[in-house]
Image (spheres, rainbow, N blue to C red):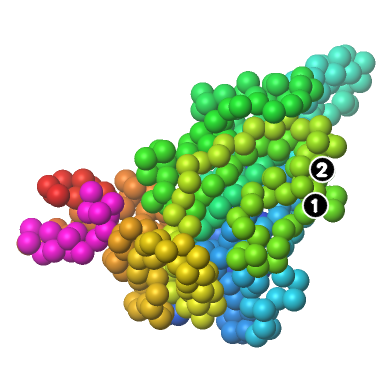
């Protein structure tokens, strides 16, 4: 018998972040920094560098994510640049999960392990050569892929099928996933008014309702559609090709998709988040070439359309040209703007965790005058001031 481990975060992150060359997403940067691979140690190959000159996108371009055990679908705000031009395939990309990445196969083996062991013990009494079944452990959450290794800041909708409920982390989290999985396995279907999908996202990304918007300012819906794998293999409705034309209607409520959801007899529960500021976007034009050249001009146009259609809407700081030096502009978020240092620290935290970041800051700032540290923090956003003052034990 072998113990096989399948990590949902690794599988789903590799599916979401793409296209890739040599297992590194083509997130071409303008700041001269190294864009690492999923193992946090990969170097850009000559093939990657050559490909990224004409084909590129960014993690902030991702708008909708549909996760099933056999396929992942991703919609971007604007088509990626492919060979120097907007991709003629449009904003949707589908990635099949095959072989070891087929989550459904792994989950079914994990669920059936107990019964397979019973059969093995019976068969072994008759045949000593009977092979003991493998144990499959489902690790990770899958939803951590929204913030690691890259933060998908502008994601608006996330839907997933029943297989994520089988994650050992979720089943032991005490947020109702184990009970919901058992409900599904008992062939119970229908709509349940629960906040479990939102609780799953918060748990997976170490967030609370209070600080959710700091990482995902545009998130509107996250939900379980149990038979999403079947739906993704049907002719589902994708909506308008350009964001500005679809009136921000949720994917799950497109007429064609409602019909598919009904026809496939789903266990369904969707968390609808509080309304968002339609002009709020996280744009990293000082880091990603795509944000600077493509996404920011598009978002500026979108915000201008909203501003002209809704007098009095506060557009914030999004009307200028491309930013500089790694600045992340949180456009239209009520005057909140993260500076380059805060953006860099948040990215480091997403990669190594809060405790390691705190340790690194303590070492880096050892010997610095308190006035210097205070001035550094004063230049951050309100949220950043509170966060890093707390980390460094400095009064705000």
Relative to 74, is 303 on the left or the right?
left
Residues at circles 2 and 1 in contact by the CB criterion of under 8 Å: yes
Residue neighbourhood size for the residue with mark 1, other residues' Cα within 10 Å, grouped as few (<14), some (14–19), many (≥20) = some
Relative to 5, is 381 on the left or the right?
left
- In the picture, the quarter occupied by the N terminus is top right
Query: In the rendered structure, which disc, 2 or 1, sits on the residue that comes first in sequence?
Result: 1
What x and y, as percent, mark residue 52?
Answer: 59, 80
Main SS of the magenta part reads helix
| 21 vs 146: above or below | below
For the point 67% across and 79% down, the residue is 86
| Residue at the spot of label 1 | 236
Q: Residue 260: which disc?
A: 2
Judged from the image, the secondary structure of the residue bearing numbered disc 2 is helix
Q: Nearer the viewer, residue 115 or 328?
A: 328
On the question of residue 6 being in view, the answer is: no
* Gap in angstroms between the C-alphas marked 2 and 1: 7 Å
For the point 64% across and 49% down, the residue is 250
What x and y, as percent, mark residue 38?
Answer: 56, 59
On the question of residue 307 being in view, the answer is: yes
């Amino acid at each position: 018998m072998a113990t096989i481990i399948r990590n949902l975060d690794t599988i789903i992150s590799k599916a979401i972040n793409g296209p890739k060359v040599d297992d590194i997403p083509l997130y071409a940067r303008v700041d001269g920094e190294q864009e690492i691979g999923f193992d946090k140690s990969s170097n850009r190959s000559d093939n990657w560098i050559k490909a990224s000159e004409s084909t590129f996108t960014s993690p902030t371009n991702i708008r909708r994510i549909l996760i099933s055990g056999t396929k992942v679908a991703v919609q971007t705000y604007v088509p990626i640049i492919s060979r120097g031009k907007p991709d003629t395939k449009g904003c949707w990309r589908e990635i099949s999960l095959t072989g070891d990445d087929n989550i459904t196969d792994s989950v079914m083996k994990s669920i059936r392990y107990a019964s397979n062991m019973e059969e093995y013990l019976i068969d072994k009494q008759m045949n000593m050569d009977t092979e003991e079944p493998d144990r499959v452990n489902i690790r990770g959450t899958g939803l951590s892929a929204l913030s690691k290794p890259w933060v998908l800041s502008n994601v608006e909708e996330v839907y997933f099928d029943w297989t994520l409920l089988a994650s050992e982390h979720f089943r032991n989290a005490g947020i109702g996933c184990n009970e919901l999985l058992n409900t599904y396995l008992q062939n119970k279907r229908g709509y349940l008014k629960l906040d479990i999908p939102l609780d799953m996202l918060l748990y997976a990304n170490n967030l609370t309702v209070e600080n959710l918007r700091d990482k995902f300012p545009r998130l509107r819906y996250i939900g379980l559609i149990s038979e999403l794998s079947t739906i993704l293999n049907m002719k589902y409705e994708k909506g308008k090709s350009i964001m500005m034309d679809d009136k921000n209607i949720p994917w799950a409520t497109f007429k064609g998709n409602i019909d598919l959801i009904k026809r496939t007899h789903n266990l369904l529960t969707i968390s609808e988040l509080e309304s968002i500021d339609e002009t709020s976007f996280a744009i990293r034009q000082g880091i990603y070439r795509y944000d600077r050249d493509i996404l920011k001009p598009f978002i500026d146009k979108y915000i201008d359309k909203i501003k002209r259609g809704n007098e009095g809407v506060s557009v914030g700081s999004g009307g200028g040209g491309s930013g500089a030096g790694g600045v992340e502009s949180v456009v239209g978020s009520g005057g909140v703007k993260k500076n380059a240092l805060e953006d860099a620290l948040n990215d480091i935290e997403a990669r190594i965790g809060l405790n390691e970041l705190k340790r690194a800051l303590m070492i880096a700032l050892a010997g610095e005058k308190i006035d210097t540290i205070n001035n550094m923090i004063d230049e951050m956003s309100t949220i950043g001031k509170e966060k890093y003052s707390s980390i460094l034990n400095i009064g705000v």
